[in-house]
């Protein structure tokens, strides 16, 4: 070999090795990109949403007078107190906390610093402490959503006043209150118990949590038994013929049908033909369980297939019938795999939004549902609804709803992993 | 009624079980010989006889009693010749009055009479249905009980019953498919009787709300309002953008994972990437609206481009991120199943690893990889929430990814969200869109699964 061709082949080799390095580098970039997306997604949503888990309270002083005396509450029951009209009393008391302000328009602005339900909050306080009320009481009531956002630092104070939801006057009052140490944060418990509301500071996840719970119970009750039994039939009993092939093709296709088509099915068949009640967890649950069924069947069949034939042959050899063999020996071994598949399927159903929009689970519902037959929303739908709201305060609520949703999904998946690790037999 | 009947049935089933159990026991004592099956199978046998017919009857009642009650209460109005929509309005008023909601005409004599009639017939229905259910199941129970003797094989029948039950469960998949096709086709056919199919498939103007306005709805208006081409173009534009993200990232990830990565890297990175597939789509939608869209807007603004706040680009990019794991995990499987001998042959010829991948493995795995792309495309076309939240709601025939454009799925949601007017071409058009979507994804999935299956068989 002469030196020239050696040189060429050396250069060639260098080029090829560089190409090799480049190619590997592309792979690293692709993976890092994917990982970075996961990271950005999570940090983005958590950083936007964590502040919804606490809320702002403002301390005010209430003075009782001749008309509203602390003694009169002692004999009253809770419902009687709740029925009282203390609106103007509460309003006047809030005004008297700011003695310097006399203009009527300014007073209106002051009331806007507080949650729209200040009267109810004062009543709740009275209810709790009705036996030891002094002549004056100091209590914390919720701030309005705008002040809440300002206090959390989510609103910029620098934008010009006419584009801001809080006026300069309100800001000065707020600063004064902060200076007097009358504003504090508290864990936002009502966020988890209340239903939806048009007032951002009152809107909570309670209704949608319960709605999701009912929906998932129905999905579990319907899809698990049907999926399990159907899979057992297909894997253990059916003979391979055109019909079972057809069923199999059907199942595989259903698993890939877009979720919104199931929503159309729910609307066309469940609501219009069977006239089931609209917007309810019942219809939502049925729709989503049809969607989950293929997932469960596929997972169960895979885990039935992994049970070795020796188990079946052993049972048959000692005289068990085919059904006894399957039900007593094969299914118990395949159950962990099936349950894992079910949990993953349910987790997917929990995050599903599109079909629920079509069957009306997207209505604005204030009451927390008490049965699967009540109109309700679900967790992801609530996030969608809040995302549609114009007010900025809903942005943090949307993120918080998503954080809760994601935590549930992570929990479900951890349970599935746990079951798989703990109970699944490797053959 | 429901809960009580349920508990009664459970109680009935348990008693029947023990009835059969002890009957078999007695037979053994009297005849001094073991019956054909184990005692418990006689129990199961009777429990099945007592519950299954009852449940079937209950379901039948549940389905039909609404119609019967309604017809009974409204029978006199039908004979008076009041038109259909007024009668159904009347019935809701009657029901509301019964449920304690005061209406403007709650005091009217007709309504009060009808409410009484409603209460009366529902009461009768409840009692008669409970009586029929339990007398029928008692009869069956008696029949079953009398059949139990020494030579009667209860196990065979119980097992046959179980098998039939399992078989019926496996039929649900077919039932669902039939349900989907039926519900879509029914409305679609009605839709095409009002709007010509060619106008739907090739028309370029989509504005169903125009057809909704009754006053303006002369025939020409309806025909021109349902041209779905802007929706198809929007769908494919967004799917194309999504594939531009997910194909390179997903494929390169799959290659790196299966050919280069150490098992420790593989074991940590793979589950993390698969998280992307498990995140609900509403989260991606929110992410697109709140982070990606403003980012693209400001980026476009800084180089002098006018980007609308809802753009196909934002929706497509986020959708692409969502689809990465679909491409990567399927391609990974496909690449891993390429036989080792092909790699070794290539190395033996002196090829580097990347040359082997590019010249040997990818061509060998190509059908499977394309199958995974097709599945990803079908995902992208059927995806709803991201586009509903981020891509815009108004139909707009454009190929510019910086403008808002709408998709098939978005329009289905826009049309059907909230209250719908039945029988209007607008509502029916959503079902026609649904059918189009269903057929498109079905074809894509079918081809993809075929290709992947054929491919894996080749190397087995």
Image (cartoon, grey):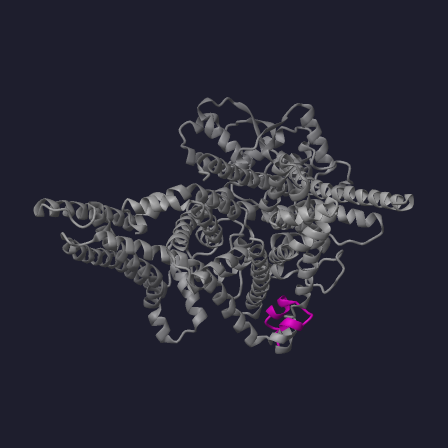
Magenta part of the chain: B200-218
Q: Nearer the viewer, residue B392 or B47?
A: B47
Residue A41 visible (yes or no):
yes
Q: Position of residue B277 (x, y in %)?
A: 60, 46
Q: Where is residue A141 in the image (x, y as percent from the top left)?
A: 57, 31
Q: Which of A83 and B207 is in front in this view?
A: B207
Q: Is residue A244 left or right of residue B237?
A: left
Report if residue B295 lies within the magenta region: no
Question: Which residue is depicted at the point 61% across and 58% down?
Answer: B378
Q: Which of A26 and B65 is in front in this view?
A: A26
Q: Is A321 above or below relative to A244?
A: above
Report if residue B208 lies within the magenta region: yes
Q: Which of A367 and A273 is in front in this view?
A: A273
Q: Position of residue B193 (x, y in %)?
A: 55, 76
Q: How many labels does the image show?
A: 0
Q: Position of residue B418 (x, y in %)?
A: 55, 58
Question: Which residue is depicted at the point 52% across and 59% down?
Answer: A253
| The furthest residue to the bottom | B219
Q: Is residue A8 left or right of residue A198?
A: right
Residue A386 visible (yes or no):
no
């Amino acid at each position: 070999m002469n030196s020239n061709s050696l040189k060429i082949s050396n250069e060639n080799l260098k080029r090829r090795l560089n190409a090799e390095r480049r190619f590997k580098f592309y792979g690293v970039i692709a993976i890092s990109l994917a990982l970075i997306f996961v990271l950005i997604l999570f940090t983005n949503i958590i950083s936007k949403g964590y502040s919804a888990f606490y809320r702002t309270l403002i301390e005010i002083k209430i003075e009782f007078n001749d008309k509203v005396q602390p003694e009169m509450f002692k004999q009253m029951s809770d419902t009687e107190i709740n029925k009282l009209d203390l609106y103007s009393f509460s309003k006047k008391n809030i005004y008297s906390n700011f003695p310097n302000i006399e203009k009527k328009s300014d007073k209106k602005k002051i009331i806007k610093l507080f949650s729209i339900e200040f009267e109810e909050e004062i009543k709740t306080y009275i209810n709790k402490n009705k036996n030891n009320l002094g002549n004056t009481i100091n209590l914390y009531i919720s701030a309005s959503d705008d002040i809440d956002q300002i206090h959390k630092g989510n609103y910029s104070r620098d934008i010009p006043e006419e584009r801001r939801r809080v006026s300069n006057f309100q800001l000065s009052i707020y600063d004064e209150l902060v200076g007097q140490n009358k504003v504090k944060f508290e864990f936002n418990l009502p966020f988890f118990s209340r239903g939806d509301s048009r007032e951002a500071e009152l809107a909570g996840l309670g209704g949608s949590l319960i709605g999701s719970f009912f929906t998932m119970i129905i999905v579990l009750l319907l899809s698990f038994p049907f999926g399990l039994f159907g899979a057992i039939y297909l894997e253990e009993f059916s003979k391979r013929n055109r019909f079972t092939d057809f069923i199999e093709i059907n199942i595989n296709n259903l698993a890939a049908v877009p979720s919104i088509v199931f929503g159309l099915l729910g609307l066309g068949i469940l609501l219009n033909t069977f006239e089931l009640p609209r917007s309810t967890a019942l219809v939502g649950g049925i729709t989503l369980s049809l969607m989950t069924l293929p997932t469960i069947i596929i997972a169960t069949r895979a885990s039935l297939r992994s049970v070795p034939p020796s188990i079946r042959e052993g049972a048959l050899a000692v005289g068990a019938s085919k059904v006894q063999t399957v039900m007593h020996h094969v299914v118990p071994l395949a159950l962990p795999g099936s349950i894992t598949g079910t949990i993953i399927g349910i987790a997917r159903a929990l995050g599903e939004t599109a079909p629920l929009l079509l069957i009306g689970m997207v209505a604005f519902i204030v009451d927390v549902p008490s049965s699967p037959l009540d109109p309700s929303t679900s967790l992801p739908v609530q996030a969608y609804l809040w995302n549609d709201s114009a007010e900025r305060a809903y942005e943090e609520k949307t993120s918080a709803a998503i954080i809760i949703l994601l935590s549930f999904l992570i929990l479900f998946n951890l349970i599935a992993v746990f079951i798989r690790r703990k109970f699944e037999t490797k053959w | 009624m429901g809960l009580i009947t349920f508990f009664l049935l459970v109680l009935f089933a348990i008693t029947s079980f023990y009835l059969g159990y002890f009957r078999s026991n007695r037979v053994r004592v009297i005849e001094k010989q073991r019956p054909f099956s184990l005692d418990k199978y006689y129990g199961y046998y009777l429990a099945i006889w007592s519950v299954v017919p009852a449940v079937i009857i209950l379901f039948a009642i549940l389905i039909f009693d609404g119609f019967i009650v309604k017809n009974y209460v409204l029978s006199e109005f039908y004979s008076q010749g009041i038109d259909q929509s007024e009668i159904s309005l009347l019935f809701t008023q009657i029901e509301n009055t019964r449920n304690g909601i005061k209406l403007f005409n709650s005091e009217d004599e007709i309504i009060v009479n009808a409410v009484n009639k409603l209460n009366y017939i529902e009461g009768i229905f409840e009692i008669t249905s409970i009586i029929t259910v339990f007398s029928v199941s008692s009869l069956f129970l008696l029949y079953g009980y009398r059949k139990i003797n020494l030579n009667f094989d209860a196990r065979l029948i119980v097992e046959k019953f179980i098998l039939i039950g399992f078989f019926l469960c496996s039929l649900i998949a077919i039932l669902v498919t039939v349900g989907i096709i039926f519900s879509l086709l029914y409305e679609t056919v009605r839709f095409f009787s009002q709007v010509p199919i060619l106008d739907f498939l090739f028309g370029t103007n989509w504005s169903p709300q125009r057809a909704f306005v009754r006053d303006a709805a002369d025939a020409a208006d309806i025909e021109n309002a349902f041209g779905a081409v802007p929706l198809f173009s929007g769908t494919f534009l967004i799917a194309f953008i999504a594939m531009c993200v997910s194909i390179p990232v997903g494929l390169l990830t799959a290659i790196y994972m299966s050919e280069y990565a150490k098992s420790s890297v593989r074991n940590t990175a793979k589950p993390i990437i698969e998280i992307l597939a498990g995140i609900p789509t509403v989260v991606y939608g929110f992410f697109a609206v709140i982070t990606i869209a403003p980012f693209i807007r400001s980026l476009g603004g800084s180089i002098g481009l006018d980007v609308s706040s809802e753009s196909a680009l934002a929706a497509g990019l986020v959708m692409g991120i969502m689809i990465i794991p679909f491409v990567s995990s399927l391609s990974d499987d496909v690449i891993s199943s390429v036989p080792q001998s092909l790699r070794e042959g290539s190395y033996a010829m002196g090829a580097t690893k990347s040359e082997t991948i590019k010249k040997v493995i990818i061509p060998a795995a190509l059908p499977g990889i394309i199958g995974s792309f097709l599945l990803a495309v079908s995902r992208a076309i059927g995806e709803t929430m991201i586009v509903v939240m981020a891509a815009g709601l108004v139909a707009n025939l454009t190929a510019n990814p910086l403008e808002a454009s709408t998709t098939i799925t978005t329009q289905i949601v826009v049309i059907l969200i909230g209250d719908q007017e039945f029988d209007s071409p607008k509502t029916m058009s959503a079902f026609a869109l649904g059918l189009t979507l269903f057929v498109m994804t079905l074809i894509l999935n079918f081809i993809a699964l075929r290709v992947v299956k054929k491919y894996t068989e080749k190397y087995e």
